[in-house]
Amino acid sequence: MISEPKVATSTTADDTLKRKSREAGVVSGGHLVARALKNEGVDTIFTLCGGHIIDIYDGCIDEGIRIIDVRHEQVAAHAADGYARQTGKLGVVVTTAGPGCTNAVTGIATAFRSESPVLHIGGQGGITQHMMGSLQDLPHTEMMRPITKFSEGVRSTERVADMVSMAIRACFAGAPGPAYLEIPRDVLDREIEISKAVIPAAGQYRASVKSLGDVADIEKLADILVQAERPVVLYGGQVWSSRGHKEAIDLVRGLDIPAYFNGASRGLLPPGDPHHFDRTRREGFDKADVILIVGTPFDFRMGYGKRLGLNAKVIQIDQDYRTVGKNRDITLGLVGDPGTILGAVLQAASGRINKGAHEKRRAWMKQLQQLEAIATEKLMPLFKSNSSPIHPYRVAYEINEFLNDDTIYIGDGGDVVTISAQAVRPRNPGQWMDPGALGSLGVGTGFAIAAGLANPEKEVMCYYGDGAFSMTSFDMETANRFGVPYIAVIGNNSAMNQIRYGQLAKYGEERGNVGNLLSDIPYGKFAEMLGGHGEEVRDPAQIAGALQRAREAVRKTRRCAVVNIWVDPAVYAPGTMAQTMYK
């Protein structure tokens, strides 16, 4: 039987002393951290306890900031990232020194490549023990600098709140990203007179990020789109993270432009919308006369820009100046907030519609819709395959059929994410989450906890590969403990299969199955151990029923459910087989 977490309620002599200190106008460094976070609107921090950081917890209690404690700092960092993605606000992870910091590195690096605003506050030994070999002492700021936009230490208690605000400014400068702030233990524990603390006022220490960019370029882009006969637009993660989705939708509907979606922008348009396209990107890019790329870089997912038609005008909108024109020449580049720019472009274009070009755009859209239907029809035999072992495409199809209008879908794995991207259609904005450009495995558990905390009225589902699930799944207990259970589905092929494909292709059967095979584990038992529902599925006809039983169990027991689906290890995603690293 799983017991409920214990909650400390007693008042100690130390509590009384601290209350008297605050009444006397004295404040500690940890309380200044909490006050600065409260000024930013932070309502939740993710953490794993450590002796260096406990005064921050005490401050959070006073400020009414929720403390979510996990079992591994990687999960805490992923959860802070996920919370930022779901709320559009700052995510915060607090770790102790040494291994507390290093365990969070993968989560911070994921946020860095995904342009997610996360503040990582880390502990450190006291300044009075600097370079003496204190417990868990490491050069944290130097380690974190390559994967953050800001990495500094606080050297006086008076500056704690000021430095927190400075780090937060960096998180939102240009394209968002993470910042690291190290605070030594004696700086956190020290008490000072409040009058001597530098505390930036809420709402007065950073400016609006809704930058329009060059007005002349807005006019140029409006003219290009009005005259275009075969335009396409690709919306990337920045469109959702900046909450520019309304303007993005208005643009494609107002000008009749086919839209494709990447990463977190999936779900901006519902399935069936006439402007929603996802199976004809190659044809669209090859034949378009104008290609508008918004909020995503020309990285490996875009073939470094080489997948765009050579004869098309290419326009790129991004929050980061350094991203525009990187890896591929462009016709026009605009730097600023995606929603602000797109809204201004539509307004500029609305008074100068070219009827001839507009009619050709509608014909172009119908042409792509016909190609979409053909592509979907080709996939249906895989989606409805009755093969045994179960075809991975059948699992993805069944998941899509299962989703509600309010289900947040999370993909955590290699081929799991690639294959499900061909089938799963989120019903609303913000309801698709994946690892992003870093390709981290293990993000799903932290993302699921964050999604549940940020959206208590919504259902959360995470589809894991078995390799990804085994990395962070023990924090399912955290989800149960904090009342945010979710449905976990595992595509289990007992292998790290995406990499296994490359090894087999390069070295053959005798040498290709090295370092990538896992045990056959009935993961449904894991959920049962935590007091939840678990189920094993080996027949494709049983998938739908198993998913429904999991949904009902989560609602009834308020515990996570696991549906472990045994899939064919001999099936790989087309993208996996096309990876150049395997050639």
Image: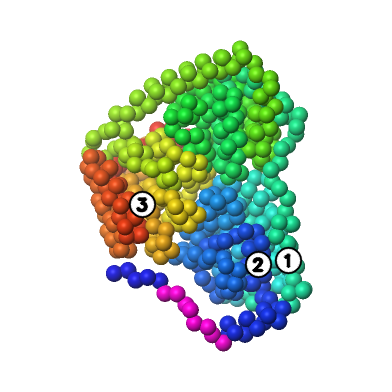
- The residue segment tinted magenta is 6-13
Of all residues shown, which one is farthest toward the bottom? 13
Q: Is residue 179 above or below residue 318?
A: below
Displayed quadrant of residue 1 = bottom left
Nearest the viewer among 96 and 175 is 175
Q: Indicate the secondary structure of the residue bearing disc 1.
A: loop
**Quarter placement of the C terminus:** top left
Q: Which numbered disc, 2 or 3, marks the residue closer to the eye? A: 2
Q: Which residue is mark 2?
A: 35
Q: Is residue 217 left or right of residue 242?
A: right
Report x, y in % for residue 561: 32, 55
Question: CA–CA distance between discs 3 and 1?
Answer: 43 Å
Task: Name the residue beneath numbered marker 3.
Answer: 488
Identify the main secondary structure in magenta: loop
Residue at x 56%, y 23% (from the top left corner): 256
Does 11 sit above or below residue 218?
below
Q: How far from the left and from the top, in percent, is residue 136?
A: 56, 71
Q: Residues within 10 Å of mark 3 (few under 14, many from 20)?
A: many
Task: Name the disc covering residue 199, or none.
Answer: 1
User: Which amino acid, mark 1?
Assistant: Ile
Asked which secondary structure carries label 2, the reply is helix
**Numbered disc 3: secondary structure:** strand
State if disc 2 and disc 1 touch (CB < 8 Å). yes
Q: Residue at x 56, y 14 (%)?
A: 360
Residue 50 in view of the camera: yes
Query: Mark 2 or mark 1, which is nearer the start of the sequence?
Result: 2
Identity of the amino acid at label 3?
Ala
Say few, some or many: other residues with alpha carbon within 10 Å of mark 2 (under 14 / 14 to 19 / 20 or more): many
